[in-house]
Amino acid sequence: MAVMQEGGTVTRHDRRAALERRIRTSLAVLGAPFVSGEYFTRWSLLMSFVVGTFLSVPSVGIPSFDGYLRGVAVAAVGWIPLAALGLCAAYAERRLAKSPGERVAVIAAAIVGLSAVRPFLNDAVSATLFGLSTGGNWTTRITTNIVTSVILFTVCAIAVTYHRRLRATTRRLRSASALMRVSTAEAAHLQSTVPTVLAQISDDLRRHRDSLLHGTVDYDAVRDYSARVRAASHRLDELTQWPPDDAPVDIDLDDARGVPVLARLSTTPPLSVGLTYVAATLPFGLSHGGPSVVMAAVTACAALDLVASLITRRARGLRARLRGLVFLATWALAGAGVLALTYALLPNVGALGLVPLLALPLTASVISMSVDAYRRARAEEVRATSVLRVSARTLASAVESARAPLRRASDLLHGRLQSRCVILAAHVDESSADTATIDTFRTQTDEVLDELRTGANLVVEETIDDLVEAWSVVMDVRVGAEPDARAAFDDPAIGEEASRLVNEALVNAVKHSAAREAAVEMERTGDRLRLRISSPGILSPRAPATPAPRGLGTRAVGTTLRQVGDQVVLEREFELPPQ
């Protein structure tokens, strides 16, 4: 069975494959923090203190506000040894665990261990400080701690992991773009000095030629002048070398963003706050109220979440600080609603019923700030990618525009002017120079030197080689191509699209890895051309194996993006146009 859609036929197999890709991507996103070596961070330590001290508090004495304050004191004291154990777990995760499986084992052992120890530790602290027990229900309390810890630490770890990855990617992109801008300025400066350089060389060679012709024109004199011409040609060749020897190798950028906290509070994914709160309190709700209470809590929390999400989304057009205040007020009202529901369902819950008044705004703030951090980093990555893509093409064009007249001038000196010197040297080596010979040499060399002085009006066409040379200020790009393949890719019908693909691949190389190397391979088989660009890195789980024919323009039919060992490979086949 197939369903026709614009652009082709979508089969049931295609839909199932797309669903499987989404599931794999979601699992990769959720699983990445567990194997990243950064599951436990200072942010999770901070959140564990706030949640463990003010929200997930033990019951000390009778349910009352005083009892809640005693519970806060017990939880705060008990958090200190738990934090020390958490730091040990973080050290083990980073330093001792060598494989992803070992990191997952350390994380699981730490969460279960800390969750199991906490009730008994709080009970001991309460007995010491107030002479009161925190009560039994050990299984329920341990289970609640495990669920809360998994949710809390995972949300923090996802935000931190992907924010750091995107931030590192953005820094690489911005650094490379800055190098491109510096080099473009150097190329523009070179281009502005070319007329002066060519005029100086032309005048210098003309002056020495006149000196030659007014003196004794013999073989040695012509040879000396020819050596001067050759030296001038070499000087021009040196100016065309790219990148220059003193090109900057790196730029340290300060990408800190002083965004106010209220400006980071905007929206949360639908149902994320309500269901997170329900999941954290599920063991307590089951033990004290049963399934009916849990179902009522799920329904009410989901409804309040949807209403709060709708309000905060409507407020996105407000000023940043006002939007943040609306966010906090909305979730505070949602917390008040859950508080009323809690006392309605569990009248004897005591001071614990006050928890949602703080828990929902805090949970919503954590999730919103995590989402905001990811979105800001992602937006900056997209912007930096676009800037780098344009910067590379701009630099390639600027470099070629600067070098084209220098190359032309070098060819004039090395070819036409040198050949005239060779002819004159051969003539005077056999016989003395007569007036006709000298006049002919003067006329011919005047033509060359006049053309050299005025420069050449050239139409610059950017090639793959030009683009690779532009990228050489950022990374070492190796090019491998047979002469027939290189000539085929210089065809304007193919060269522009191939250059765009190379540019896109090298932008991706900066994004995928801090490694500063890439390889460009061009092959020809009959009327088929294959362009392959590879660089060290790890392909993002969001990237499809075969890019769709849309978006940046380089991902057309026949283009693949895949992981091959430790290399990210972008490849495309071209068909040669008919002759």
Image (tube, rainbow, N blue to C red):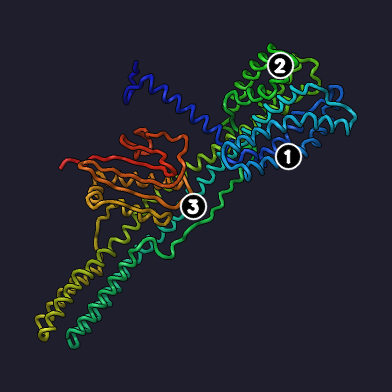
Q: Earlier in the sequence, mark 1 or mark 2?
A: 1
Residue 286's tag is: 2
Q: Is residue 152 above or below residue 3?
A: below
Badge 2, how many Cα within 10 Å: few under 14, some, many 20+? some
Q: Which residue is mark 1?
A: 85
Q: What separation in Å lies between label 3 and label 2 (alpha carbons)?
A: 54 Å
Q: Do the numbered discs 3 and 2 sit on residues whose CB atoms are within 8 Å?
A: no
Between 489 and 405, the one lying in front of the other is 489
Does any portion of residue 271 appear in the rendered image?
yes
Amino acid type of the residue tagged 2 in the rendering: Leu
Q: Residue furthest right?
A: 131
Amino acid type of the residue tagged 1 in the rendering: Leu
Q: Does residue 312 appear to the left or right of 487 in the view shown?
A: right
Q: Do the numbered discs 1 and 2 sit on residues whose CB atoms are within 8 Å?
A: no
Badge 1, how many Cα within 10 Å: few under 14, some, many 20+? some
Q: Earlier in the sequence, mark 3 or mark 1?
A: 1
Between 290 and 87, the one lying in front of the other is 87
Query: For the residues carrying marks 1 and 2, which lies nearer the camera in this image?
Result: 1
Query: Residue 365 in the image: x percent, y percent?
Result: 65, 32
Q: What separation in Å lies between label 3 and label 1 (alpha carbons)?
A: 39 Å
Quadrant of the image occupied by residue 571: top left
Q: What separation in Å lies between label 1 and label 2 (alpha carbons)?
A: 30 Å
Q: Is residue 525 above or below residue 359?
A: below
Query: Residue 391 in the image: x percent, y percent?
Result: 40, 50
Q: Does residue 329 appear to the left or right of 77 in the view shown?
A: left
**Quadrant of the frame with the N terminus:** top left
Q: Do the numbered discs 3 and 1 sit on residues whose CB atoms are within 8 Å?
A: no
